Image (cartoon, helix red, strand yellow):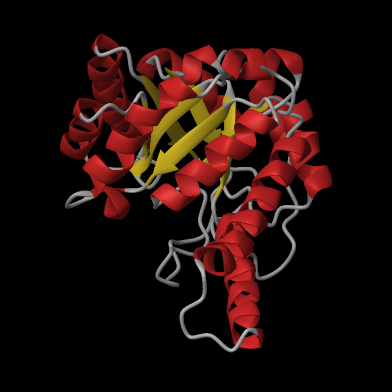
Amino acid sequence: MLTNLNEVLPQARKEGYAVPAFDCIEDFMIRTILDTAEKKKSPVILMSLRHDLEGKGFSYIAGLINKVAPEYDIPIVLHLDHAENFEFIKQAIDNGFTSVMYDGSKLPFEENIKNTKEIVDYAHTKGVTVEAELGHVGGMKLDGSREGDSQLTRAEDVKIFIEKTGVDALAVSIGTAHGVYESEPELNIERLKEINEISSIPLVLHGGSGTPVEQVQESIKNGIAKINIFADLRISMYKGLLEAAKKAEQEGRIDPTPDVLFEPIRNSLSDAVAGKIEDLFADNRV
């Protein structure tokens, strides 16, 4: 069933788990993630980025999820990830997204507030929830380029930002980064505790891939209710692809059967999704 962040994150924050938020770019990923989440009885957030939605992407991704969501007995949020353009956010809402993230984290504080409030005011009239970012989570873009250094969220800014924007969830920067880590991160849990004391809304952790599980779980204990995951899914699919290629080579075929071609990738992805659900304490919550 399709829903929004307000239907899943407050409960997660209250009960001490985080809802996994998986970026997905193809129907293969969508089906595997949803089937696995339903088996684990976990709520799930399916996310897409702008470059995956342009062209016919809205029809393929949003259209598919809107069609299949009623077939699943778990809460499913369709979430636009890291959007910086208001018109594109409106387009996502028109195409059935139930939640959007406006990323004004690289802007001056007051400009981030102004833009976020405009988007919140519009989205709420459509029953759509909004996530914003305060501080900045840096790291690697998908093309391998850097998107700047992370800047930790200042606890003293959180209360003002929430009150002035009316946002539904807040992504905070406490030491994670996007993409694959060059060295093991060290989350600033003390900063998170300060933010959680102040925040009236659920908190979000970006850069969940590769972060040591004990640090992830400590962040959940201190207010994180949504964790974004993408790189670990890509890694799992690549491992499955290598296994599929090896099996096809062993069989001496240039035309592997669908089972040989897809099953190792699906199984590897499903194992990664199930593992993340368990790590986030999100299994058996539905």
Say if 143 sits above or below 280 in the image.
below
Residue at (43% x, 26% y) in the render: 69
Left or right of residue 221, residue 251 in this image: left
Q: How many marks?
A: 0
Let me know if residue 161 appears in the view.
no
Task: Pinpoint residue 136: horizontal percent, then vertical percent.
Answer: 49, 47
- Tell me, yes or no, if residue 71 can be seen here: yes
Left or right, 83 with respect to 266, comes to left
- At which x and y percent is residue 81? 40, 41
Residue positioned 40% across, 29% down in the render: 68
Residue 160 in percent (x, y) is at 46, 19
Foreground pick, 122 / 231 = 231
In this view, the residue in front, 194 or 97, is 97
**236 up-or-down from 136: above or below:** below
x then y, percent, for residue 234: 55, 61
Residue appearing at x 62%, y 29% in the figure: 38
Q: Is residue 27 left or right of residue 125?
A: right
Which of 57/181 is in front? 57
**In the rendered image, which quarter is residue 236 located in?**
bottom right
Measuring 49% from the left and 14% from the top, which residue is drawn there? Answer: 6
Figure quadrant of the C terminus: top right
Looking at this view, is 204 or 26 the one in front?
Answer: 26
